[in-house]
Each structure stands twice: as C-alpha cells, then as structure tokens.
Amino acid sequence: MLIAKNLTKKYGNHVALNRLNLTIKEGEIFALLGQNGAGKTTTINLFLGFIQPSEGTVSINNIDVVENTHETKQHLAYIPETVMLYPNLTGIENLEFFSALAGFSYSQEELGSFLSKAGLQKKAHQQNLGGYSKGMRQKVGIAIAIAKNAKALLLDEPTSGLDPKASNEFSEILKELSANGTAILMATHDIFRAKEVAHRIGIMKEGNLVSVIEAKDISANELEQLYLQTV
Ligand SMILES: Nc1ncnc2c1ncn2[C@@H]1O[C@H](COP(=O)(O)OP(=O)(O)OP(=O)(O)O)[C@@H](O)[C@H]1O
C-alpha cells in the first residue's frame, strides 16, 4: 500500500507538489497523468526516497519512507523510462545481480522463470543486455520486481517509446502483478494506456492532483476530453 498525506515538495518558492493525499491499495493500479512539470516524477521520487518532502508524509506498507528509507526500498521496485542495466551481462545475469542486491539468492531455473513470467522470450535470457530492445529491458525490470516480491511498483513513463504490441504486453504484465496484490503507481503521458491498464486515474496540474477518476466509469475519449479541459 502506498500512502501520501499532505505531501508537499517545494524548491525555493516553487511548489512542485502541493498537499497530495493519495492511497493506493494492494492490487490497485493508479495512473498519474499531467503535462510536463505537473509533479508526476516528483511524486514518484518522494515514494522512492530519492528526495525529501518539504511537508507531509509518505509511506509504503505503513512504513515511513523518510524515517526508514532503506526498509521501504526493500518493498519497492522502480521502473524508469529507461531501465538501467549492465550491457555486458546477460538478462539472467542482470537479474541475478539485482536480486542479490535486494538480498535474494535464486537458482538459474528460478531466475529463468521470473524472466519468462515477465514475458521475456527464453532465447533472450542468455543474450547480453546490450542487444536488447527497450521493451526487453523493461521486462527485465519487471522480472526484478517479481524476484524482489515487491509489494509496490513505481513506474515513470514506462511505455514511452514502446511499440503498440510491446506496450500492450507490458500492460498485461502489470495487470498480472496487480492481480497478485502489488500496488502500482504509474506516471504516463499515454491517456489510452492509462485507461486500459489502471483502476484509477489522477490528473495533475501545477503540483496539484486536481481530478481522480475510476477508469471503469469513463471511456478513453471522455478521459482525453477531461484531460484536455483540466490541464
Ligand atoms: N531539482 C529541482 N529543482 C528545482 N525545480 C525542480 C526540480 N525537480 C523538479 N522541479 C520542478 O518541479 C515541477 C514538477 O516537476 P516533475 O518532474 O515532477 O514534473 P512531471 O510531471 O514529472 O513532468 P514530465 O512529464 O516532464 O516528466 C516542475 O516545475 C519542475 O521544474
């Protein structure tokens, strides 16, 4: 569970995030939409403990991120726009390395099964990351989340630059993770993907979460109209 209470981030006089109140429950996918500079990445970085709040609190599974950054990181997986992995290691070696960093030791069979669950074709497991497409790298990122048994997954524009098929596959994997109880927060510019994958959608403007919609209550076209009227 991800909780922000009155979460605020200021840079000097500039309010990047203003009194955000948000709870994302186990198994829920929440998509954040908003123009450049609206505060989406700031929100994600606060949950990650990369930056400190100016006011308010942020917690993961009821553990305060500021007070226990190290502990909350163990519950988290993070997929940025470009997943940073070692180009000279294979998919399975990268997964082994990042699982070990998180304190997990898995057999080659287990590591392979996580990569397969994340949708990576078997023949790619033993290939160097340097030759992977963006979609394949994202899948290794997902496999790391599975290997860590992450309770929360944070994604910053994960489907930007993915082709429609890769993007669709990625959405399906996110749905599977949510069905297994992972709380997912995803910042995106892709309105249609947000509608397709998320349970709830928030629209941010100038640091404020101005609208929260249940995805099932709105069509993709209505969401686009609402977005354009809001931002
Ligand atoms: N380190 C920083 N110093 C000063 N201002 C910052 C800093 N980081 C972010 N900001 C400001 O905070 C605001 C929110 O930025 P943020 O990156 O969260 O937006 P975003 O919604 O993720 O945008 P994008 O869609 O471009 O990724 C912006 O006005 C940005 O200029």
Image: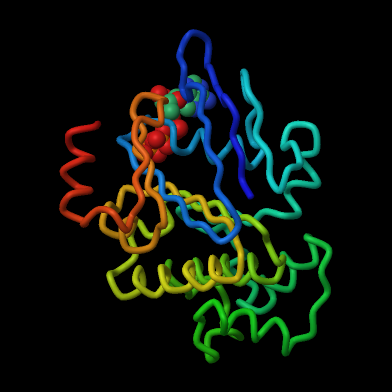
Between 217 and 62, which is closer to the camera in this rendering? 217
**Looking at the picture, does residue 54 appear above or below residue 108?**
above
Q: Is residue 219 left or right of residue 69?
A: left
The image quadrant that residue 40 belongs to is top left
Residue shown at 56%/61% (left/top)?
A: 27
- Residue 62 coordinates in the image, percent (x, y): 73, 43
**Looking at the picture, does residue 218 appear above or below residue 143?**
above
Q: Is residue 183 left or right of residue 57?
A: left
Between 167 and 98, which is closer to the camera in this rendering? 167
Residue shown at 52%/16% (left/top)?
A: 11
| Ligand 1: quadrant of the figure | top left
- Residue 4 coordinates in the image, percent (x, y): 59, 34
Between 149 and 122, which is closer to the camera in this rendering? 149
**Looking at the picture, does residue 82 appear above or below residue 106?**
above
Q: Is residue 71 left or right of residue 191?
A: right
The image quadrant that residue 92 belongs to is bottom right
